[in-house]
Image (spheres, rainbow, N blue to C red):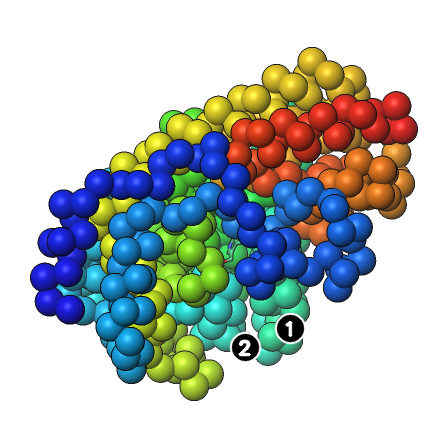
Amino acid sequence: MKGRSVVLHIMAERNIDFDIITDRRNTRSLKYDFTKEYGIPKDALPLWVADMDFKTSSYVQDALKNLAEHGIFGYSREQGTYIHAVKRWHKKYYGRDIQSDWIVVTPGVMFAVAAAVNAFTDENDAVIIQQPVYYPFRDAVVNNGRRLVVNELYLGCDNRFHIDYEDFEKKIINENVKLFILCNPHNPVARSWTEDELARLGDICLEHGVKVVSDEIHADFVFSGVHTVFAGIKKDYEEITVTCTSPSKTFNIAGLQISNIIIAGDDMRKRFIKTFKATGYCEPNAMALAACEAAYLYGDEWYEALHSYIRKNIGYIGKFISENLPGVTVTEHEATYLVWINFKGLGMSDVELDDILINRAGLWLDSGLMFGAGGSGFQRINVACPAAVLKKALERLKNVHTYL
Ligand SMILES: Cc1ncc(COP(=O)(O)O)c(C=O)c1O
């Protein structure tokens, strides 16, 4: 396999036509092949779970093909080129130098979040999250026998979600919170937190001895300003933080299950590794290693073209909804490819809204309530799809507007 990466690099990127519609049915796709299990009509357009309807970079495809052709899939581990690739991506896109030994490879971000909950808290300890938020955060807390504490985000007059810092600090003190799971950027409210906002949270955590898991899986999809790595703001934050990154959202390889967890603090890293090893997990998936390495070494052109394409889809949905759907608004969109639509102006219950969207419009979205009580009246739509698919979805929405 030696020298393969050089061969890959001189070939051109082939997968940057994002208008192409690829049939994903009958590929074991969670998004497309499980309507029956979820009780969804067969022909509903699936714009829910956060993966994309685009082929990954051809460099990633080729790396996987090469390994498949090699035909041996024995135990594998990350090597120097892999580590170099991860560090390169961090430096180029997040402006952060990370050290090689800070990187811990795990089979996914949620695996790492759950491992961090186990490593840094004891049973019944309190863990704080900011709902509405990616719902597996709640599960990682509750399913591990920890106490869930919620700091609700609120919608400001600027049509953006904001943090109630007073409530955040009060709950940390009153509930004796030990760990904060931060979503940065934030899924589903589409915020790219500013350095000031993050620093206010970070200072509160430092003051009260709260460790932080910063889930930065959506860092490559910031459309307003630049992504701020929480741990990169201050040296003190670096010492209390587990940063979760992954090529899975960016390169549409979630099914390969790989993430890179960055932990600068030696003691924290040792504790984290000990806890996740206790699950029995040892070496990373061989295909995932090859895919991640190729993505972070050669995927720039593909990624940058994808970023522009998604930006256009975001602009399109905002315009379409404001022109065609009175009473419905799109929350100001700063990050992620998941758009947070506000249907509250229609005064419907969540059950009614879900029913009309699924059964009349034929749209499979994520109902806002899944993300916590503050998600009531909202729906999350995944716009990482060809523009023609998004147009079709929005036409379906427009057609049922009289029922809304
Ligand atoms: C904020 C956030 N974290 C984690 C994940 C899942 O990551 P993984 O598949 O690596 O566990 C998602 C997927 O949508 C997500 O939105």
The answer to the question of whether label 1 and label 2 lie on touching residues, with beta carbons closer than 8 A, is no
Q: Residues within 10 Å of mark 1 (few under 14, many from 20)?
A: few
Specify the quadrant that holds the C terminus: top right
Which amino acid is tagged 1? Answer: Asn
Q: Is residue 260 above or below residue 389?
A: below
The residue shown at (85%, 38%) is 360
Give coordinates of residue 212: x percent, y percent. 44, 57
Quarter assignment of residue 244: bottom left
- The residue closer to the viewer here, 192 or 147, is 192
Q: Which mark is residue 122?
A: 2
For this view, does 241 lie left or right of residue 8? right
The residue shown at (58%, 63%) is 28
Element on which disc 2 rests: loop
Of the two numbered discs 1 and 2 in the rendering, the one whose residue sits closer to the viewer: 1
Name the residue beneath numbered marker 1: 143
The residue shown at (44%, 50%) is 252
Q: Is residue 269 above or below residue 156?
A: below
